[in-house]
Image (cartoon, grey):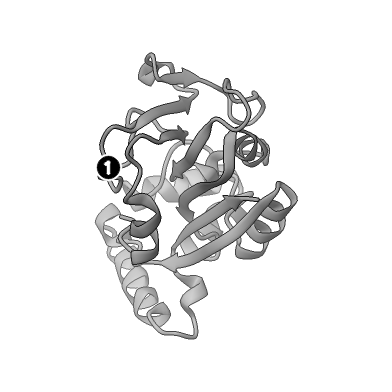
Amino acid sequence: EVTDQFYQKILKNLKGTKLLNIGCGKYLIPRFIKSKNIKAFGLDIDEAVLSKRILKTDINKDPFPFADNEFDFVVSLWSVEHFSNFNFLIESQRVLKKDGYFIFVTPNVLYPIMLANKILPYSWSDYLRKKLGKWGSNDPAFYRFNNYHIIKREARKAGFIIERIDFAGPANALNYSENPFFQKVCSTWERIINNPVLFWLKPILIVSLRKD
């Protein structure tokens, strides 16, 4: 959950604001947003979750079905890694009001499991997922926007100001597999990166961008 004081500060006064959740699945408003009276809309390609406020959109290629400067906030939780290009970034900037925020949570591609998923051929990574149990998603992951330097570069090109990029964890990877070797590797790795020097290898990126 996004519990840091920085995020609590910018998210606590959302009453009456308009929010867009991209790649939302069936959860229109993220759990960490406690404010009520939010006018929320979502975008997803899965027809099973569509409703009056969750609209079908191929985020990789479709323009978002909203006017320019319409939203105060855009959020995306665990979806950015599944987008194959930066259309989501350009469209998020377009529909945001000036000084509006785009906040997203996504895996850090430098975390070993994510790095392996990116480097290995799909057939190998699919085999690995099956061996490890519940870890990961069956949806293809591209990791186009899961690197600190790429985030900074592409966000600025799209017209965003980088407010903050946090490295968070642990990944709780032990919850996803009963494989003893996998559990031992994850446990050892979590101990290694839990220090000020290797923080950039932590598994989760929490990013806050503001429209210039």
Residue 18: x and y in percent read 43, 33
**Compared to 80, does 21 lie above or below?**
above
- Total numbered labels placed on residues in the image: 1
The quadrant in which residue 26 appears is top left
Q: Is residue 212 left or right of residue 191?
A: right
Residue type, numbered disc 1: Ser
The quadrant in which residue 87 appears is top right
> Which residue is labeled 1 in the image?
35
**Compared to 112, does 29 lie above or below?**
above
Pick the residue in front: 194 or 63.
Answer: 63
Residue 177: x and y in percent read 28, 54
Q: Can residue 120 be spotted in the picture?
A: no
**Compared to 189, does 195 lie above or below?**
below
Q: Is residue 92 left or right of residue 13?
A: right
Seen at 51% across and 56% down, the residue is 208
Is the residue marked by circle 1 packed among few (<14), some (14-19), or many (20+) residues within 10 Å?
Answer: some
Residue 210: x and y in percent read 57, 52
Pick the residue in front: 171 or 125.
Answer: 171
Q: SS for tag 1?
A: loop
Seen at 67% across and 41% down, the residue is 86
Q: Can residue 1 be spotted in the picture?
A: yes
Residue 10: x and y in percent read 40, 54
Q: Which image quadrant: the N terminus?
A: bottom left
